[in-house]
Amino acid sequence: MSEFSVSALDGLSVGGSVTIREMGRQGMVSLRADLSAAAKAVARVTGAEMPAQRKISAGKECAVAWMSPDEVLILCAADQAGKIAFDLSEALTGQHHLALDISDARAMFSVTGEAGAIRDVLAKITPADIGALGLGEMRRTRLQQVAGAIWFEAGDEARVICFRSVARYVFDLLAMSAREGGTVGYHG
Amino acid sequence: MLTFRCPYCGIDACETELAPGGEAHLKRFGPGSADADFEAYLFLRHNAKGVHFERWRHAMGCGKWFLAARCTATLEVFGTYPAQTPEPPQDIVAAIRAKRPDWSLS
């Protein structure tokens, strides 16, 4: 059940070489299970195919992202997360699994601007090879001191997720990385 | 900088995305074992200069443990493989032999 009525930073946004915005309340459901055995249930509840390694597949008003060999993350509307978690548990009855609404444990940011500038801003705060990160690929990595994940929603928009408890830290990191005067120009 | 390819998610992970877990392929000596065996299991490590088998965890990623073979002197990585492997697999051993002809699995 979602307990918070506001997200971590309540839609805070800041400009710079790119624009960073905390995206407000975002539904997220974590599913841990034998992914091949859970594919049918996931398709029935979300309408999405089970994503291949590190990929994100689109479903009915939601997306399913591969997080580890036994974990997927379902991104959906905030008010749908509880229902999706419940429906998954129902569909997987008798199978060893965990489906949980973790919306309140996370924060999500959008980074929008020129394609190259976005990659520069992200590359400054993570050891991941941002130049090689394609559309629809989920990259779990380190954002300076904390764990996070990055993917490209479109050529001119990246999304970043992290734990709610470090939302301010990640926002400040992104804001600092995007500050005017700190452009790198590496990714063109 | 060390870069290992995680065998679970296929990412080339930088050392800073990983958590080290010490030497791999230790045989556990638990309750009822001889004191010398228990001491060796707890404390005595190869500490090799050269080829070394290690445990690593993809802590800032998929969270899985995996094993790696690398050279402690040159930081050259020979290969990585899943943690559920009791001894170094053939292809890893072959990769090490190709680079270090005088090395033998002890």
Image: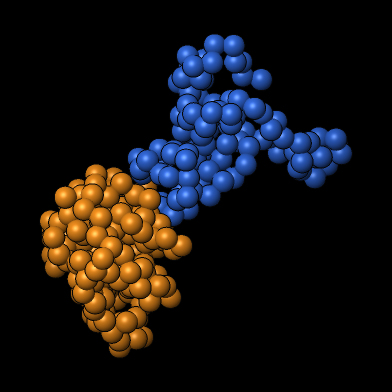
Chain colours: A orange, B blue
Apparent side of residue A16 relative to residue A168 in the rendered image (left or right)? left
What's the residue at 28%, 84% (across, down)?
A10
What's the residue at 63%, 37% (across, down)?
B23
Q: Quadrant of the N terminus of chain A?
A: bottom left
Apparent side of residue B64 relative to residue A48 in the rendered image (left or right)? right
Please identify the quarter of the rendering in which residue B26 is found: top right
Depth order, front residue of B105/A94:
B105
Apparent side of residue A17 relative to residue B73 in the rendered image (left or right)? left
Please identify the quarter of the rendering in which residue B46 is found: top right
Q: Residue furthest right?
A: B35
What's the residue at 44%, 63% (across, down)?
A146
Q: On screen, A81 above or below A150? A: below
Residue A4, visible in the rendered structure: yes
Depth order, front residue of A168/B36:
A168
- Spot occupied by residue B96 in the image (x, y as percentages of width and height): 51, 20
Residue A133, visible in the rendered structure: no
Depth order, front residue of A84/B71:
B71
Depth order, front residue of A35/A173:
A173
Q: Residue furthest front?
A: A181
Q: On screen, B8 above or below A173? A: above
- Spot occupied by residue A7 in the image (x, y as percentages of width and height): 31, 82
What's the residue at 60%, 25% (across, down)?
B50
Q: How many marks?
A: 0
- Spot occupied by residue A95 in the image (x, y as percentages of width and height): 38, 56
Please identify the quarter of the rendering in which residue A33 is found: bottom left
Q: Residue furthest top?
A: B101
Q: On screen, B19 above or below A80? A: above
- Spot occupied by residue B98 in the image (x, y as percentages of width and height): 47, 14
